[in-house]
Image (cartoon, rainbow, N blue to C red):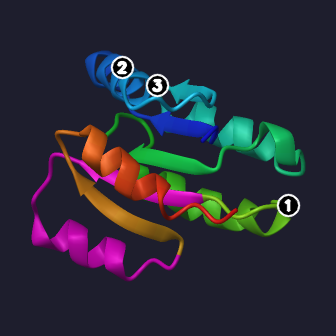
Amino acid sequence: MTPKICVIDDDTIYQFTTKKIISNAGIKGEVLIFSDAENALEFFSTESENRDNLPDIIFLDINMPFMDGWQFLDAFAKIVPRFPKSIEVFLVSSSVDEADTDRAAKIPLISGYIFKPFTKEKLLESLSRIQS
C-alpha cells in the first residue's frame, strides 16, 4: 500500500512518532507534515487541482495555535469541491470532550475521530477507509 498521508499537528514529538508508526506499519507512501493549519491550508489551496500532490488521508489535530482544526475544516470545506479525488479526514485529539466528538460527527467531511495516542492499529483501520 502506498497512500500519501498528511499529518497536521503542531506537536513535533507527535509528528515524529506518527512517522515512525507509519514506517513500522510498512506503509511506503509519502508523508506530508504540517506544523500549523495555515500552511496546510495554503498547500491545499495551491495544489487543489493537482491529483498527484494531494494526500489520500489527513490526520488533523484539533488543538493548535493560530488556526485550530475546526477553523481549518471550515476553510478546507470551501476548497474540497475543486479536488480531483476524495480525501479521508480524521480528527486526532487527546480531547475526550463529548462536545468535540459530537461536533465532529455532524461534519460530513470528517471520516472519523481518533483519540491519542495514535497507534499502528488506528493507522491501519483509518487507511482501510481509503477508496481506491
Q: Label 1: few (<14), some or many (≥20) within 10 Å? A: few
Separation of disc 2 and disc 3 at Cα?
17 Å
Separation of disc 2 and disc 1 at Cα?
29 Å
- Counting from the top left corner in percent of width and height, residue 81 is at 78, 70
Report if the CB atoms under discs 2 and 3 are less than 8 Å apart: no
Q: Is residue 23 visible?
A: yes
Upstream in the sequence, badge 2 or badge 1? Answer: 2
Report if the CB atoms under discs 2 and 1 are less than 8 Å apart: no
Separation of disc 3 and disc 1 at Cα?
25 Å
Q: Which residue is mark 3?
A: 35
Please indicate whether residue 30 sits to the left or right of residue 6 in the image: right
Which of the 4 image quadrants contains residue 118?
A: top left
- Counting from the top left corner in percent of width and height, residue 17 is at 29, 21
Asked if 41 appears above or below 131 in the picture, the reply is above
Asked if 110 appears above or below 31 in the picture, the reply is below
- Residue 97 is inside the magenta segment: yes
Q: Which residue is mark 2?
A: 20
Please indicate whether residue 103 sits to the left or right of residue 106 in the image: left
The numbered dot on residue 84 is 1
Foreground tag (3 vs 1)? 1
Asked if 79 appears above or below 50 in the picture, the reply is below
Where's the C terminus, which quadrant?
A: bottom right
* Residue stretch rendered in magenta on the structure: 88-108
Residue type beneath disc 1 = Pro
Q: Label 3: few (<14), some or many (≥20) within 10 Å? A: some
